[in-house]
Image: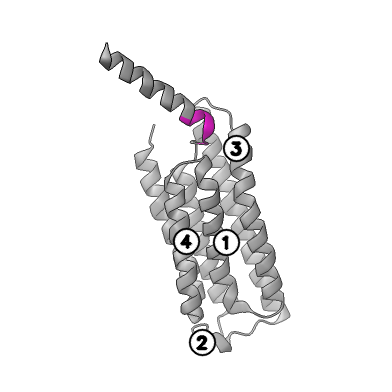
Amino acid sequence: MKEKYLADLKDIKDIMDRSSRFISLSGRSGIAAGIIALVGAYLAYTIVFANQDYMGYHSSVLTGGSLSQLLLIAVGTLVLAVGTGIYFTTQKTKKQKQKIWDHQTKRLLLNLLIPLATGGILCCMLLLKGYVGLVAPLTLIFYGLALVNASKYTLKEVRSLGLLEILLGLLSVQFIGYGLIFWAFGFGMLHIVYGTVMEFKYKP
């Protein structure tokens, strides 16, 4: 009787957890986003900074053409990463026979987008004013804040990823000339590691 009571309590807890959290995040979406980010970082380095010593903070100068290229790479990377994330998460949700768009999804996206939008607008303003070195650290910091803010509505591992992104962003400010390397590690390697862990841990 006691064992049945404990089992019922566990089932109730699982149902409540599912009703209050979006748990269909796909590990494959993290891996795909990481690979896309690494490709984007490589393109940014080879196309935009090919003839410049990016390791020196004061030596990186963006012309109008290189700025347009950088923004194009950034937008392309974002669109591809979000697109693959939506695709893999949708596929996982269908396999779990759950709804992709519900109250939990809305809360998750709202809490994710507020810091992301704020950071994105700030970074665009800084980039247009020529503060190139601050863009990579701030994108990491605001992305980390967005993950921490949204983590209460999804899997707990998202919070850990967010804290690591914030830490990387702060380190990137300290070593500001290496921003692109920190950016590639934060958005690339950390996502691949996170996605791999999630894929094996929550494999159906």
Labels 3, 2: front one: 3
Prevailing SS of the magenta stretch: helix
Q: Find residue 56 and name its label.
A: 2
| Residue placed most toward the observer, 203 or 12 | 12
Mark closer to the chain start, 1 or 2: 2
Labels 4, 2: front one: 4
Where's residue 188, x and y in %? 46, 60
Q: Secondary structure at mark 3?
A: helix
Q: Secondary structure at mark 2?
A: loop
Which residue sits at x=48%, y=63%? Answer: 166
Can you say whether 52 is above or below 119 in the image? below
| Residue placed most toward the observer, 76 or 101 | 101
Mark closer to the chain start, 4 or 1: 1
Can you say whether 170 is above or below 195 in the image? below
Q: Secondary structure at mark 1?
A: helix
Q: Find residue 165 and name its label.
A: 4
Where's residue 184, x and y in %? 48, 66
Quadrant the N terminus occupies: top left
Q: Find residue 172 and name its label.
A: none
Residue ID for mark 3: 105
| Residue placed most toward the observer, 6 or 178 | 6
Question: CA–CA distance between discs 4 and 3?
Answer: 22 Å
Marks 4,3: beta carbons within 8 A: no
Please state if 198 lies on the left or on the right of 71 as rendered.
Answer: left
Quadrant the C terminus occupies: top left
Could you classify mark 3 by the number of other residues whose Cα lies within 10 Å: few (under 14), some (14-19), or many (20 or more)? some
For residue 20: magenta? Answer: yes
* Kind of residue indicated by mark 4: Glu
